[in-house]
Structures are given as structure tokens and as C-alpha cells.
Image (cartoon, helix red, strand yellow):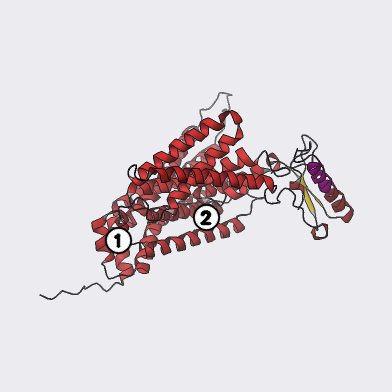
Amino acid sequence: MTATPSQSKLRPFWLNARTKLIANRKPLIVYGVLQLLGLPLIVLSAVLEISASLHYVPYNFDGNPVEEPYWVRYGSMYAGLGLIFFCVSLLLGFLFAVGSFDYLFRKAKVDMTYALPINTRQRFFSDFLTGAAMYLLPFLAACGLCYAIFETGCILQDGLRKALGEMPFSLELAAIIVALGMLFLYACTVFAMTCCGTQAESLIAIVCVLFLVPITVMVFGLVYLQGGMYGIDIESTLLKLLEHTGPVGAGSVFISFLENETQYSIGSWAATYLAEILVLVGVTYLLCRHRKAEDTSKPYVYRFMYYFTMGALMTCLYAIAVSDADTLIPVLIFSAVVYLIAEIITNRGFKKFYKSLIRFTVTMAIIAGFTALLDATDYFGVVQRLPEASNISSITFSCNENYNSIYWDSSMETQPKVELTEPEQIEAVYGLHKRLLNAYDANYGVHPPVHHYSGAVG
């Protein structure tokens, strides 16, 4: 008996993409409905509410109160319902990642998939791009529908465009921020799944990549660094770093953008953020290319994911432990229990348990050594750093109107800014900075009374 050749004229890349699309059609339909009910419902309720308010007069000619129109009273309720639909739909990005790479956790299916006449590069990018398209295209379609609703409302209702035009942010740029965040969420999910051989460990890895990284940045920074980095407003510094830590960073940018679009640069952030996504996709492809069929059912195909997860978690706990001497011992005991339980689960038992004890000791020693190095070097010289006076062309600082202070803190982001360009002014401010650092050194690291001076140097 001879094998019948396939009659399909599609290339392996597109044939695989079509197969994935058909296999995920049910969650795609649910996701598409949620997307089309989410943002469009928010925009429609806003259009109807504003249109009704334009014609609403609180009192009639007799002086009697007039009942508010239906959409003025209940428009926010429909907008809230649309927001719920949209938020739920965002979480479904996990489904498309799992649906596109489900063979990674099933022994029979991975053998069959690897035996298909398609190479690893074609299979990976076909799976990845198909899942990303199923995740992003309904969102873009919903944005297009929002635009159509907006334009139709402006045609039918005079004054609507002017009323909506007073919104303090650009809907197009907001959509770009959300789309990039969605793409990063999807890419992080695929990356975490590639590093694991079981669904349970992959779920833990996904949560770690999406949430533990930004949590570690914030906890270590706010608990440990905030009290030690003289002259540095750590909250503002961490916020800038947080903006590049996955989907949480996109959410942070989105909120900042809505609050103050005119002073927030989206272009540079979007370029860096997109570069991070591309690097993550490239690393995921390399890991997938070296992954073997027999790696399925292993807890972690690549052990660095486990060490990364536990290292981040232990860093958070250590920062909390050293922040208060009274809690040091209890938190360290809790850290040891958490670490050893994770070791037992990962190793599927108590075999070579002494190695787990050694790993915990080494992990905490590395974290303690790193923090000690930060203290000994004044955070690798960041505290002592000042640019050369000859390289400073201008100095910009925010003026706190309430306290008549030029010293910057995170609450002064929207305060009026003053720019100094005269050489005498630059020299005076630069000299102030030098004197503050000299006072800091003279007190052997004890903070002088003035803080957060470094934000003034531009």
C-alpha cells in the first residue's frame, strides 16, 4: 500500500496555522464576543450619555425639576459592564497560548507534532503568530468599531465631537499601549510554558514572569533601597523601571498616560518595550528549538526558571526580613519553609534533601552578599554620581508651590518646572549638590537634613 500524498496546496506554515485556528475556534468566538461587547459598549455609553446631557435642562419653564435622561443616569453602569467584559477578555490570552502550544505537556501529542513534515522554526512561528493574531485581531476590530461609533455619533449629534475632544488623552495612543501590553502578556506566557514540562509548573512560572518580577522590583526597592539611597527619589526611579517589566509595566504606563498625556513620552517607551518583546520571542524560539520530546512531563525543562522564581521570591522575603530586626528570624524561618516545600514538590520527594538545604543557604548568602556589596559601594556609586559641570547645559527642577521648595519628590510630577541655563546659576546649583554630598560623606552615610536633591540636575 502506498501513502496518498496530501492534496493541500498550503505551505506547512499556513497549514499548521489553519489547524491551530480550527482547534481554537470555540475560545476565539467567546473571546471575540467579549471584545466586541467591551470597549464598544464603553464608547457607546459615553456617546449616548454625552448626547443626552447636551440636551438636558434641569428645570422646565415652570421651575419644576426635570428628570435626568436614562443614559445620564445609567450610562456609567453600561460603561462599567463593558469594562468588566474587556478585562475578562484580556485574561483569555492565556487560552490562546495554551491552545497553540498544548502539545508541550502531552507526551503522545508532542511525539506526533514533532513527527510532522514541518521544521521547528516554521512550527514555532506558525504557532506563536497564530495565537497572537487570535488574541490581538479581535481587540483591533473592537477599536475599529469604537471609532465607527464615535464618528457616527459625531455626525448625528452636533457638539459631541467638541465634548469628547476635551478628553485629556489620545484614544489611538491608548490603544497602542494596551496592544503592546497584550502582546507582552502572550509572549511571557509562551516563554514560561516553553521552560516547563508540566501544566502545574508552567502555571507557577507564568505567574512568576507576569507578576513576581514587578513585585520583586517594588518590594526590594521600597523596602530595602528607599532608606539607603541618599538623594535618589526611589519611587520615581522604580516607576520608570517598572514600566518595562511586562504587562504590569504597560498598565503603569497606561495609567500615567491617562493622568498626564502632554508630559509623557510614549514613543521612546514603546520602542524599548517592543524591543523587549522581540528579544523575549527570540529567546523563547531558541529554547523551543533545543527542547526535546522526552522533556515532556519534567517539572522544569530548563532549571533556570525554577532558580529564577525562587531567587525572586527569596529576595522579596529577605528585603522584608532585614527591614525590621524584630522580624528577621521569623521571616527567615518562613523563607526556609517555603523554599524547602518548593524543593520537595519540584524533586517529587525527599531524595537528596541535603542538597536542598545547601541550595537555600547559598541562595540567601548570595542575596545577603549582594545587598552588603550595595551598602559598601554606595549602590555602585549611584549616590555619589554627579555629571561633570562642563557637561551640564541646563538644570530643570520642579517648584513645589505648597512648600516653596525646589527639591523634587514623586508628588511633584505635574508641578511647574523651572529651567536654568545661565552659567552662574548652573554653578550655584552644582555647588549645592557637591556640598550636600560632602556633608553626607562627613557624616559617614548619615543623611543630612535635605533629601532628593539629585532630581534637580538635568
The amino acid type, in three-letter code, at marker 1 is Ala
Mostly what secondary structure, the magenta segment? helix
Q: Is 162 situated left or right of 361 in this image?
A: right
Q: Which mark is residue 293?
A: 1
Instruction: Specify whether residue 400 is painted magenta.
Output: no
Helix or strand or loop: what does disc 1 sit on?
Answer: helix
Instruction: Give the residue displayed 54% in from the left and 49% down from the top.
Output: 249
Instruction: Specify whether residue 444 is painted magenta.
Output: yes
Instruction: Give the residue displayed 35% in from the left and 67% down from the top.
Output: 120
Q: Is residue 339 above or below residue 428?
A: above
Give the camera-side residue of 235 and 288.
Answer: 288
Q: Is 442 situated left or right of 301 in this image?
A: right
Q: Is 162 situated left or right of 119 in this image?
A: right
Magenta region, residue range: 432-445
Where residue 456 appears, x then y in whole percent?
Answer: 77, 47
The amino acid type, in three-letter code, at marker 2 is Ile
Furthest residue to the right? Answer: 424
Q: Which residue is mark 2?
A: 176
Q: Which mark is residue 116?
A: none
Q: Is 408 situated left or right of 343 in this image?
A: right
